[in-house]
Amino acid sequence: MIDSTSIPLSAIRKPPLPNPADAPTEDIREQLYELEEAGELIVQRVPGPYIEVMTKYGRTKKIPEQMTWHHKSCGQCGHIPGYSTSIFWLNRQFGMNYVDPTDQTSCTAWNYYASATSNAVAQAAVASRNFAAAYETGYFPMIHCGTSYGHYKETRQEIVHHPELRRKVRDIMAKLNKPLVVPEEIVHYSEWIHAMRDRIAKKQVRDFSSITASIHPACHYYKLVTEDAIYDPDIYGGQRTATVTGIVESLGSTVGDYSTFFDCCGFGFRHILVQRDFSRSFATQRKIEVMKEEANPDVVITHDTGCVTTLDKSQFAARAHQRNVGVPVLSDAQYAALAMGAHPYRIVQLHWHATDYTALLEKMGIDWEKAWAEFEGDLKRLESGEIEYLSWEDADAK
Amino acid sequence: MSVTAPPAPFTADPGATLSPDSYLDVAYEDKLALWEEVKADDRFPDYLYGCYECGICVAACPSARFYDFSPRKIAQAAAREDVELIFEQMNDDVWNCSQCFSCNRCPRQNSPGGLITLLREVAVRNGLGTAKEALEGYGRVVYKIMTTGTQISPDMLQPDAFPDWGPDVEKTSDNLELWRRALPPETLHTTEMSWQVSDETLIELYLIWLHSDVMDMIAEADEGLHMIILDVMEETLEDAGYEV
């Protein structure tokens, strides 16, 4: 029997670069420009400077460095807010110009995939309203959530392919006094991290070389409109998406590969809220336990809201059943922020996570007890009224 | 875009919760009308190109490992237009799908997950009893997303709602307001919504719901919830000078 995990990644033969002309899928951007020329919609261009990366079939994708309009994630902001905070913190460390808008709504896709209490017109109108809000500011949408990213890629295709849908959405947008705008690229924050990975590594202040990380690629990042996800011949021979793995390798960590990498996390959209026995079982039995047995990682790194939530929170109940679990789960943004010296509680907000992460912090050289005491000091200042909110300056205070 | 015409009235009560035995009691014409509604959706041709019966979708499917569920059967029933089986699936199987779209790995470019999205939509739009049953306990989430524009609020983290997530949930709940103020991004100082959404943005969102037939779907799924959401929307819109 061949043990797939015994094959070193470096041994995978490097394939030739794909020829974009041979791609089995369309380049939706060309059709977007044609629709724009016909006056049907506005295409928001990626502002410069941007970084070019390669997608699955060899097409290049532009990732804006800055001038980004941060389309936040419901689950990240609501239940694991250190995820969003870390994304903003990374942008601030590089002096990037960005907007954290209040005229943004959820993409509403979590609800849509869970309950179906919506339809294609409403979903496209919600997407278009957010796109128009970004366009009005001159900043380019940077999508934090993997599901929003995947759903928006699908929505963009539907808007392009279905004239009747386009007309209905345009009519609704007219009632809001907004144009129908579609971004030239749908950009996920993890693509920005991937594109910036060498620059992030240059600012690394903590040694992560002793850490083994298993990667969970988020389903809605690369299984929806797969041709728009980033792939790289130097990472898994171009056979799996390169995001997340790229930054983990750039930070000097070992990638602990495992056989069920393609499996989802078990989130299930409706299941995580109302049928969680499924989510818990899948997350622990098909993901965490397999990782433990095959790679024994110090941490799981992923790049979506539901994945961090499901893989992290599901482990408590499994531990009560003596299952082989107990691996902390972080997003790539949190991992990169910690590498660059971010405070584990003021910025990365690890107290919102469930699985014990203290051994990981110790391996990173972080005195977590001291850090928690500092954060408790912040909480006392907040409680006493000395400060109303913790500011970015407070969070970076030494 | 997705509906040509509402299906003809059911001869059996489609709103009643169906047991597998009672699927046969629903008239074929009614089942056919539901299937025609699925096929009329513009997205349908993008999701189904036939089926090799290779089972790759099943191998990739998380729900197939834990439920009596098969994305291959969904694609096959649709490809064969097996109206009876599709009706059964619409009442049962579709709610087991994880919507991860691992099944998009299909070598024939099918999207069983996409088909399920359409089947679910039709089930909700027609108020099938099994859809209502599947959405029981989900009303609070629908209310949250439709009225606040964000789906997950920090104050949902209650120990009785997430007992399996461990004792930290209680700690978070007890310290919620304080911990939210300890977040550097200004938009995250919220407890009832994921982030701060402006009033003007909420009005725009409500107008989208009202102009895209979503409220009719909510009415079919849960009449009480529909009334509550409509009240919130009407009050906000009327305060802003809109005639509802």
Image: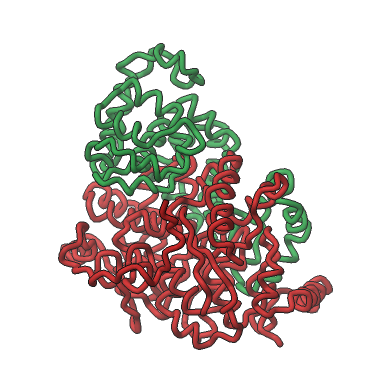
* Residue B113 image position (x, y, % from top left): 37, 42
Judge by depth and name the residue closer to the eye, A289 or A27: A289
Inspect this view and state whether residue B143 appears: no
Colour applied to chain B: green
Write the residue at 45% across / 45% down: A112
| Displayed quadrant of residue A190 | bottom left
A241 in relation to B45, above or below: below
Residue A156 shown left or right of residue A271 in the figure:
left
Name the residue furthest front. A1
Q: According to the colouring, which chain is red?
A: A
* Residue B97 image position (x, y, % from top left): 45, 39
* Residue B86 image position (x, y, % from top left): 35, 26
Judge by depth and name the residue closer to the eye, A246 or A148: A246
Residue A279 shown left or right of residue A143 in the figure:
right
A46 in relation to A317, above or below: below
Inspect this view and state whether residue A144 appears: yes
Write the residue at 23% across / 72% down: A17
Judge by depth and name the residue closer to the eye, A124 or A95: A95
- Total label count? 0
Residue A186 shown left or right of residue A198 in the figure:
left
* Residue A301 image position (x, y, % from top left): 53, 65
Please state, as top left, top right, bottom left or bottom right, where the C terminus of chain A lies in the image: bottom right
B122 in relation to A16, above or below: above
Write the residue at 20% across / 57% down: A24
Judge by depth and name the residue closer to the eye, A302 or B130: A302
Identify the colour scheme used: by chain
